[in-house]
Image (cartoon, rainbow, N blue to C red):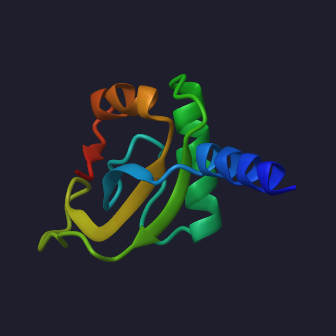
Amino acid sequence: MLGLLLLSFACQEEENPDPLVYWEQTGCADPWQTGPLETEEKLIKAVESYLKDKNVKNARVTSIFHDGREGVCLACTCTTGNRIYIAAPQNQKERLLNLGFQSID
């Protein structure tokens, strides 16, 4: 019984990795074509769809926090202060970095 519990926990850990990378959300220059006024649900769907289209395997948005740098301009490329955190298997990290995400470590 204990073995089954440990196996279940190990699988759960593998399926739910810690965030590897984050994205500094911009006013309107993000590649998934959403802005800071979108609902969180719509933003998550857009980001995850973008990652799937870019062939990033098993990536998911884990959280969106207002803990980044907020730009003091109104240009599309200015950051909003929101960071979008992404969890994915370690073997997908390089692909995420090549797409412009930033490493957490």
Q: Residue furthest left?
A: 72
Image quarter (top left, top right, bottom left or bottom right) of the N terminus? bottom right
Closest to the observer, 62 or 42 = 62
Q: Tell me: residue 41, above or below residue 54.
A: below
Classify residue 50 as left or right of residue 73.
Answer: right
Q: Tell me: residue 40, above or below residue 13.
A: below
Q: Tell me: residue 79, above or below residue 12.
A: below
Q: Residue furthest right?
A: 1
Residue 41, quarter of picture:
bottom right
Closest to the observer, 21 or 16 = 16
Classify residue 31 as left or right of residue 80.
Answer: right
Residue at 69% across / 44% down in the picture?
11
Classify residue 1 as left or right of residue 52.
Answer: right
Percent across and percent down for residue 69 are 17, 70
Percent across and percent down for residue 97 are 29, 33
Residue 84, quarter of picture:
bottom left
Residue 55, quarter of picture:
top right
Residue at 48% across / 72% down in the picture?
37
Percent across and percent down for residue 28 are 35, 55
Q: Tell me: residue 59, above or below residue 3.
A: above
